[in-house]
Image: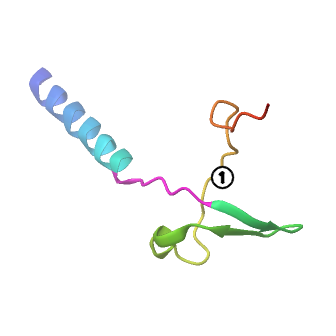
Amino acid sequence: MKISGIVFLAAVLGLFATAALAAEIIDCKVVSARKDTLVLDCGRKAALLEPGETVKIRSMSKRRAPLMGC
C-alpha cells in the first residue's frame, strides 16, 4: 500500500514538473497603452500567442532596469 502511494505521488509530481516546463516565457515590449488595451511587440515569438489568449504581465524589476547616470 505504501509503495503504490509513493509511486502515485511521484507520478503527480512528474506531471506538475512537465506542465511547468511546458509554459514558455515570452518577452514582449509595450508599444502602446490605452484605457483597457495594451499593444505588445513580441517579435518572432508572437506566432506562439493566439488572439484572446490570457497572459500574465509583470513589470520590469528594478534590478533589470537600466542604470541612469553620468
Left or right of residue 35, residue 31 in this image: left
Quadrant, the C terminus: top right
Task: Name above or below for residue 67 compared with residue 18.
Answer: above
Q: Residue furthest front?
A: 70
The magenta stretch spans residue 23 = yes
Q: Which residue is labeled 1 in the image? A: 57
Where is 53 relative to 23, above or below?
below
Q: Residue at x 47, y 68 (%)?
A: 45
60 vs 4: above or below:
below
User: Predominant secondary structure in magenta?
Assistant: loop
For badge 1, the amino acid type reads Ile
What residue is at 33 percent from the left and 42 percent from the top?
16
In the picture, measured across the screen, residue 34 lies left or right of residue 39, that is right
Q: Residue at image x 24%, y 31%?
A: 9
**Which is more toward the observer, 24 or 32?**
32
Quadrant position of the N terminus in the picture: top left
| Residue 61 image point, x, y percent | 67, 36
- Residue sitting nearer the eye, 45 or 66: 66
- Residue at 65 percent across and 60 percent down: it is 29
Indicate the secondary structure of the residue bearing disc 1: loop
Q: Residue furthest right?
A: 35
What is the magenta range? 22-28
- Which of the 4 image quarters holds residue 67? top right
* Residue toward you, 59 or 23: 59
- For this rendering, which residue is in front, 4 or 50? 50
Label 1 crowding class (10 Å Cα cut-off): few <14, some 14-19, many 20+? few
Residue 20 location, x and y as percent? 38, 45
Q: In the rendering, at what x and y percent does residue 32 appear?
A: 79, 68
Q: Is residue 20 magenta?
A: no
For the image shown, how many numbered marks are present on the structure?
1
